[in-house]
Image (cartoon, rainbow, N blue to C red):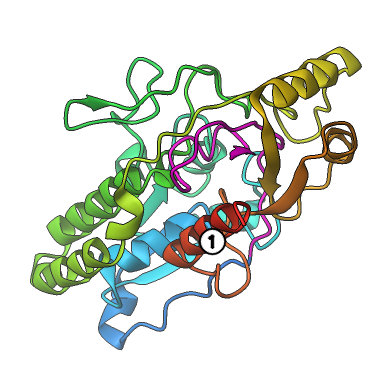
Amino acid sequence: MRLGIKRSTWTTVGAALSSLVLVAGCNGSAASPSPSESSEAAADYTVIATTSVFADLAQLALGDNVMIETIVPAGVDVHTFEPSPADAQKLAGADLIVMNGLGLDEWALSLLEAAGKSEEDVLELAEGIDESNAWVYLEGEEHDAAAPDAHGHGGSDPHIWLDPKGAAIYVDRIAARVAAELPERAAEIESARDAFHDAFGYFARAYGIEIVGVAVEAPGQEPSAKEIAALIDAIKAAGVTSVFSEAQFPSKVLDQVAAETGATVLENLYSDALGDAPANSYLGAMRANASAILASFK
């Protein structure tokens, strides 16, 4: 059985699938996590992440050893988010600003001067991981990502955390940075990081996903009639029976694709932001996505 799926966020996460199709731009239904309920000792070091996903990865990396907050509020797309002076003020109180980079959340850099911060206060999680337009380049192994990014990021796909190996690198980088700045808490941080590595093993397998096409390249950019027709032909030729999009991403294109191909549209994947429980954590969102994909086989 072949599935249709959104390309850039789901190139390597899912089940043992054969052929996929991109159907929606990048917008999650997100419930941003509350600041961590840290001990009093943690309140003297604050990590501010650009999104709920990175805030949760920071929580997995650091446990309750620091205070963790996020900038992008629930239900707001990181790609179109417009920061305010209040966000700059929020950053002013941060000891570390965690962002993705690769064009995903570059607006955070524009807040640094207003916040009295420098780039030395920023940890760009994706720095040095993406190479030669590969999906993820790590440990000498290049993961296939021949198609261009479907979110207007040029040739690089910034959604590295959706490959669990990439998420593991993010967790390691956060842990290493903060442990270096808080050596007295290094042992506790190492313990928190190791707990994540034990938990995500199921998702670290290779999934062999092939991309068939893309319907919506970026939020608000509906395809032309010619592009939709080409996508429908590709879906029929590949025998795709299920088409996935992100949660809370409405698009008339999906209805047309379903009507003309007979494919089932499943609008319930998470990528740039977390959602309601059980998808209110990184691992929870990954489990929800895997379950949705597997259920489409039944």
The image shows residue 70, relative to residue 110, as above or below, that is below
Q: Position of residue 46 (x, y in %)?
A: 36, 66
Residue 188 seen in the current view: yes
Q: Position of residue 12 (x, y in %)?
A: 43, 38
Residue 227 located left or right of residue 192: right
Quadrant into which the C terminus falls? bottom right
Residue 21 lies within the magenta run: yes
Residue under label 1, please give it.
Answer: 291
Q: Quadrant of residue 225?
A: top right
Q: Quadrant of residue 7?
A: top right
Q: Position of residue 199 (x, y in %)?
A: 28, 67
Q: Give the total of numbered labels.
A: 1
Residue 262 lies within the magenta run: no
Residue 93 seen in the current view: no
The image shows residue 109, relative to residue 43, as above or below, that is above
Quadrant into which the N terminus falls? top right
- Measuring 23% from the left and 61% from the top, which residue is drawn there? 197
Towards the viewer: 110 or 55: 55
Dominant secondary structure, magenta = loop
- Measuring 55% from the left and 33% from the top, which residue is drawn there? 8
Instruction: Report crowding for label 1: few under 14, some 14 to 19, many 20 or more residues within 10 A (C-alpha).
Output: some
Residue 30 located left or right of residue 37: right
Residue 47 located left or right of residue 229: left
Towards the viewer: 87 or 175: 175
Q: Quadrant of residue 278?
A: bottom right
Residue placed farthest to the bottom in the image? 40
Q: Amino acid at mark 1?
A: Ser
Name the element at disc 1: helix
User: Magenta residues?
Assistant: 1-30
The image shows residue 126, relative to residue 289, as above or below, that is above
- Measuring 41% from the left and 34% from the top, which residue is drawn there? 208
